[in-house]
Image (spheres, rainbow, N blue to C red):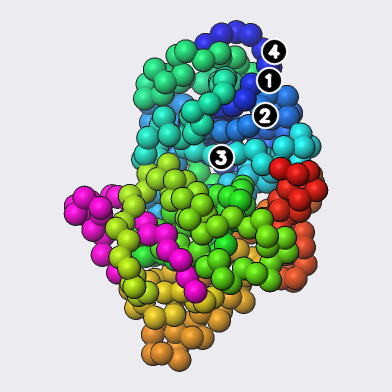
């Protein structure tokens, strides 16, 4: 690793941080560095990779062993980092920049995670003293590298913050639901979408079902004329889930009620592999109202009422209610905190979203 500290502007930047319990508990220093470095370093993509230093198990792997218990903990952390990335994009005037967060301990291809674009120049910036994992050292050997100062807490007294859930003693309740579902438009895939998808994937223990609203349902959206077509939205979500280590399931035509079997495209079943299926939905419910094999639903805070409507529909059909996991909305405005905002209409106005991105595209002609 080079000792140079001057930040150069490249097309793509990879930023490495230590992922320790203290960072998980308080990522404010990480956010400050992102706000400083992103506008100066990158024009097209910015990737943050978290690595647990030392020879012990990666912290992300530890959290994934009890996803239900650790869901709130990780969503608070990821939400703050993605909010920092979104704010830095706004500061830099690069609304369409591709930003993404990954962790050592994920499955999937490191080349796909770190080098999402085949064009442009790359650089890597790492915190001083952070060892580069062997699985990526060869990938980054040919790109410029620099370091920045960052305190790495001693692992001897660094413990995972306690969860605020009341059932910590129940090990069975801490396992993730076998089949998790979520839905949305996922137009111009952005930081808020990736937060929602990453947490849903983290929570799932077998399968994730993602429903994307059909093109025919989107005519009433603001700036609907530049909403991405379904095929492009499907591809964006699928590629992101593959980068997280998910295995894409076969698509079967006319299959509204999606099977929750763990069969992959290769016809194999793996206990630790999370499969996913991304499908068009033609109403607000998708498969969640009729599939008895779905166990949980992930919603953003401004769409809680939609989750409640799903459970009402399920009860009408004699099905059990889904467990609902709520992801806090993130904003792309510095120092704006939405955690205490409950009104769904207000949240929709304040959140970072596709509507604002479409408006920016219309105004800037991109």
Residue bearing mark 2: 43
Q: Which mark is residue 6?
A: 4
Q: In the rendered view, would you say 316 is above or below 67?
A: below
The residue depicted at 77 percent of the width and 37 percent of the height is 93
Real-space CA distance between mark 1 and mark 3, rounded to the nearest whole angstrom: 18 Å
Disc 2, SS: strand
Give the quarter of the image for residue 181: bottom left
> Nearer the observer, disc 1 or disc 3?
1
In the image, residue 301 above or below residue 287: above
Residue 344: give x, y in percent of width and height: 71, 71
Q: Earlier in the sequence, mark 1 or mark 3?
A: 1
Q: Is residue 267 left or right of residue 91?
A: left
Going 47% across and 46% down the picture, which residue do you hit? 240
In this figure, which residue is indicated by the disc labeled 3? 100
Q: Which one is nearer the viewer's eye here, 19 or 195?
A: 195
Residue 261 belongs to the span the image colors magenta: yes
**Quadrant in which the C terminus appears:** top right
Within-10-Å neighbours for mark 4: few <14, some 14–19, many 20+: few
Where residue 316 appears, as percent x and y from the top left, is: 45, 91
Give the Cα distance between marks 4 and 3. Answer: 23 Å
Q: Nearer the viewer, residue 328 or 249?
A: 249
Residue 9, numbered circle: 1
Q: Are marks 2 and 1 in contact (CB under 8 Å)?
A: yes
Task: Give SS at disc 3.
Answer: strand
Q: Is residue 291 magenta?
A: no
């Amino acid at each position: 690793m080079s000792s140079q500290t001057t930040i150069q502007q490249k097309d793509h930047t990879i930023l490495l941080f230590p992922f320790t319990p203290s960072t998980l508990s308080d990522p404010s220093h990480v956010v400050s560095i992102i706000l400083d470095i992103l506008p100066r370093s990158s024009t097209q993509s910015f990737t943050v990779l978290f690595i647990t230093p030392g020879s012990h198990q990666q912290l992300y792997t530890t959290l994934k062993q009890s996803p239900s218990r650790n869901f709130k903990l990780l969503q608070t952390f990821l939400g703050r980092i993605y909010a920092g990335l979104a704010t830095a994009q706004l500061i830099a005037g690069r609304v369409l920049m591709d930003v993404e967060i990954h962790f050592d301990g994920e499955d999937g291809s490191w080349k796909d995670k770190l080098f999402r674009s085949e064009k442009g120049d790359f650089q890597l910036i790492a915190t001083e003293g952070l060892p580069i994992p062997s699985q990526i050292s060869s990938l980054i050997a040919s790109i410029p590298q620099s370091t920045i100062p960052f305190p790495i807490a001693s692992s001897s007294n660094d413990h995972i913050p306690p969860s605020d859930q009341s059932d910590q003693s129940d090990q069975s309740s801490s396992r993730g639901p076998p089949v998790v579902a979520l839905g949305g438009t996922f137009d111009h895939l952005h930081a808020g979408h990736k937060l929602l998808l990453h947490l849903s994937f983290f929570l799932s223990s077998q399968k994730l079902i993602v429903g994307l609203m059909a093109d025919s349902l989107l005519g009433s959206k603001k700036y609907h004329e530049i909403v991405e077509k379904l095929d492009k939205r499907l591809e964006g979500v699928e590629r992101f889930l593959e980068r997280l280590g998910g295995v894409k399931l076969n698509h079967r035509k006319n299959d509204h009620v999606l099977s929750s079997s763990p069969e992959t495209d290769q016809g194999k079943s793996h206990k630790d592999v999370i499969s996913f299926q991304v499908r068009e939905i033609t109403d607000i419910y998708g498969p969640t109202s009729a599939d008895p094999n779905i166990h949980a639903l992930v919603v953003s805070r401004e769409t809680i009422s939609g989750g409640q409507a799903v459970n009402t529909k399920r009860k009408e059909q004699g099905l059990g209610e889904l467990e609902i996991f709520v992801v806090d909305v993130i904003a792309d405005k510095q120092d704006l905190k939405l955690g205490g905002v409950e009104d769904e209409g207000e949240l929709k106005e304040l959140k970072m979203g596709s509507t604002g991105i479409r408006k920016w595209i219309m105004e800037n002609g991109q």
